[in-house]
Image (cartoon, rainbow, N blue to C red):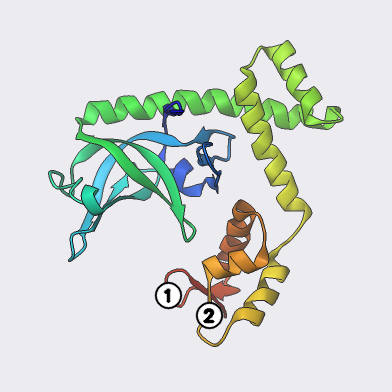
């Protein structure tokens, strides 16, 4: 049975880059969960190409797109490797594609890319800002009200009844709030440091292997690894490998 195509969500690149990638199995699409509870499987964004690359064998290409909030790589493989042939550094583009993650990097697989004028880029930014402002309003109310309810289900019913907010938006924001609370309850960094010591044979540990051995939920694992790197406790001697300082 053919699955319904996910709607391309107008997005800021910063929300895709900093969001938590949630990997799903079988027919359910994976997605980025943003800090305000937006689930993005397909994104629609507008920005400027600031870098372009083509592998020597012609089986891989990428462009880096910057929208002033952040920059993200857009990758094409094998028969699609010529996807960016007609585009150059400096072009303003509209990009629609699927979000993906590899080795802790969120990126985009392109479906549509076309050149746009500056005024369209401004329109896109204003449209996204309006959506984020509305979502931030709901998020702030949930944070203020959550301590008054025994569980999130009761809080969701209250939000729908009192404010008339969309049930799906509330559910997605509550998932983000719940994930943040779970991460606060347990610090996984000491556990990861123990595993790095155990697995390191001198050159560091592949991040993918550390994830497999640690058996931690991937989005929580990525955040803990990010904190180890940001805090200067660990570093990457080469891409995809982590080592204690």
Q: Residue at x 68, y 66 (%)?
A: 189
In front here: 211 or 221? Answer: 211
Q: Secondary structure at mark 1?
A: loop
Q: Residue at x 40, y 24 (%)?
A: 127
Estimate how packed mark 1 is, as few (under 14), some (14 to 19) or many (20 or more) residues with alpha carbons within 10 Å: few
Q: Residue at x 54, y 88 (%)?
A: 202
Which quarter of the image is occupied by the C terminus? Answer: bottom right
The residue most toward the right is 150
Q: CA distance from mark 1 to mark 2?
A: 9 Å
Q: What label does residue 143 carry, if any? A: none
User: Could you tell whether 183 is left or right of 133 in the image?
Assistant: right
Labels in figure, total:
2
User: Could you tell whether 113 is left or right of 100 in the image?
Assistant: left
In front here: 219 or 28? Answer: 28
Q: Earlier in the sequence, mark 1 or mark 2?
A: 2
Q: What label does residue 204 carry, if any? A: 2
User: Which residue corresponds to mark 1?
Assistant: 238
Q: Is residue 154 above or below residue 53?
A: above
Q: Position of residue 207 (x, y in %)?
A: 53, 68
Q: Position of residue 104 (x, y in %)?
A: 49, 58
Question: Looking at the rendering, which quadrant does residue 93 occupy?
Answer: top left
Q: Secondary structure at mark 2?
A: loop
Find out whether the residues at labels 1 and 2 contact each other: C-beta distance under 8 Å.
yes
Q: Is residue 55 above or below residue 117?
A: below
Q: Position of residue 76 (x, y in %)?
A: 28, 50
Q: Position of residue 220 (x, y in %)?
A: 64, 54
């Amino acid at each position: 049975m053919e699955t319904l195509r996910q709607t391309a969500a107008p997005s800021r690149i910063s929300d895709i880059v900093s969001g938590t990638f949630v990997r799903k199995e079988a027919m359910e699409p994976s997605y980025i969960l943003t800090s305000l509870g937006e689930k993005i499987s397909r994104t629609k964004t507008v920005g400027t190409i600031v870098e372009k690359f083509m592998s020597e064998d012609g089986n891989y290409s990428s462009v880096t797109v910057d929208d002033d909030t952040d920059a993200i790589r857009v990758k094409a493989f094998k028969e699609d490797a010529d996807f960016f042939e007609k585009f150059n550094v400096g072009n303003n583009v509209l990009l629609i594609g699927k979000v993906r993650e590899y080795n802790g990097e969120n990126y985009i697989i392109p479906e549509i890319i076309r050149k746009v004028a500056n005024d369209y880029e401004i329109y896109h930014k204003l449209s996204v800002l309006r959506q984020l402002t509305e979502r931030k309003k709901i998020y702030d109310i949930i944070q203020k009200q959550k301590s008054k309810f025994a569980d999130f289900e009761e809080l969701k019913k209250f939000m729908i009844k009192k404010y008339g907010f969309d049930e799906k938006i509330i559910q997605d924001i509550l998932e983000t709030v719940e994930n943040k609370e779970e991460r606060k309850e347990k610090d996984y960094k000491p556990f990861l440091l123990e595993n790095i010591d155990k697995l390191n044979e001198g050159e560091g540990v592949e991040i993918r292997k550390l994830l497999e051995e640690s058996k931690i939920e991937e989005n929580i694992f990525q955040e803990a690894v990010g904190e180890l790197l940001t805090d200067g406790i660990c570093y990457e001697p080469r891409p995809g490998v982590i080592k204690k300082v």
